[in-house]
Every structure is written in structure tokens, then in C-alpha cells.
Image (tube, grey):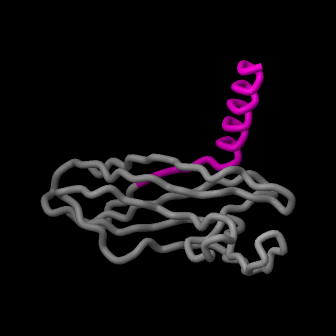
Amino acid sequence: MRIILFLLLLCNKAAAQDIVRWEFTAKKISDKVYELHIVPIVREKWHIYSLTSPDGAGMPTHVQFLSNPVADLQGTLQQKGIVISRYEKVFDETVQFLEGPVEFVQRVKLKAAIKTKIQGTIQYMACTEEQCTRPMQKPFAISLE
């Protein structure tokens, strides 16, 4: 019985991870300034929640950057894409989710012109009209060269 439960949980986790695939790139703006681009590729009919969706109404997407002694974040994380606001009965709340091409952009300024990595974790939840994945975490590391 334990083996069957383990296999079901493993299949569910693999299926949930297949719903959203993440791409991470860095674009050099000047000698010490970069733009980090975090792009979710979301399977058709699914969506992820906006950075600004209210807590308790799905899980807002959250990007946490780890501290880096040679880099400073410049400004706040920018969300680019179509934001849909809609009342969802299941949450009894108006939610904000992202649809179509989406991109999160963060500027970073290095303290010296050296190679480093910006690391962090994305927390998110993907949903359709009928179902949601469990909350997910995706660690990342973006090289700055």
C-alpha cells in the first residue's frame, strides 16, 4: 500500500511540474548592470497567479532573491504580461492571474565587474477553471558574466 501511495504522489508531483516550465536569462545592460528575465512557460488552459493576487485567493507568485555580497537589486521585480482580475467563487475573492506570455524582470547592479550568480526561489500555484496544483517551489541560479 505504501508503494502505491508513493507512486501516486510521485506521478502527481511530476505532472504538476510539467504544467509550468521556467526559463532564466540575464541581459547585460551596461558594464555592471544586468536585467534578470524569469519566464514561466505555462501549459495551455492553465494560469499562474499575479504577484499582486490577494493571499488566500490562490497563491500569488512570489520571487525570493538570495543575498549576494557583490550584487544589489535595483528597484522592484516587474511583472510583464496580461493580468486578469476575476471573482472566483471557490475562494470567494477577486483573484489576479496571468495569461499569455508573461515575464518577470529584475535589474541587478554589481559592485565590481566580476562573474557571479543570482540565486533564489519562485513560489507559485497553477490552476485551470476546474483544478489547481499544490503550491510549488522552483529554485534558480542565473549566471552574470
Could you say where residue 145 lies in the image, as x and y percent from the top left? 26, 49
Viewer-side residue, 14 vs 116: 14
Viewer-side residue, 97 vs 8: 8
Magenta highlight on residue 11 = yes
Could you say where residue 47 lies in the image, as x and y percent from the top left? 72, 61
Please state if 143 lies on the left or on the right of 63 as rendered.
left
Viewer-side residue, 112 vs 14: 14
Residue at x 70% of width, y 47% of height: 19
Residue 8 against residue 131 in the figure, above or below: above
Residue at x 38% of width, y 47% of height: 141
Residue at x 57% of width, y 77% of height: 52
Residue 93 against residue 128 in the figure, above or below: below
Could you say where residue 28 lies in the image, as x and y percent from the top left? 32, 61
Decide whether the magenta segment is chiefly helix, strand or loop: helix
Please state if 134 lies on the left or on the right of 38 as rendered.
right
Tell me where the magenta segment starts and ends, as one range.
1-25
> Total marks drawn?
0
Viewer-side residue, 139 vs 10: 10
Residue 87 against residue 91 in the figure, above or below: below
Residue at x 71% of width, y 51% of height: 133
Residue projecting furthest to the front = 1
Could you say where residue 31 lies in the image, as x and y percent from the top left? 21, 63
Magenta highlight on residue 81 = no
- On-image quarter of the N terminus: top right
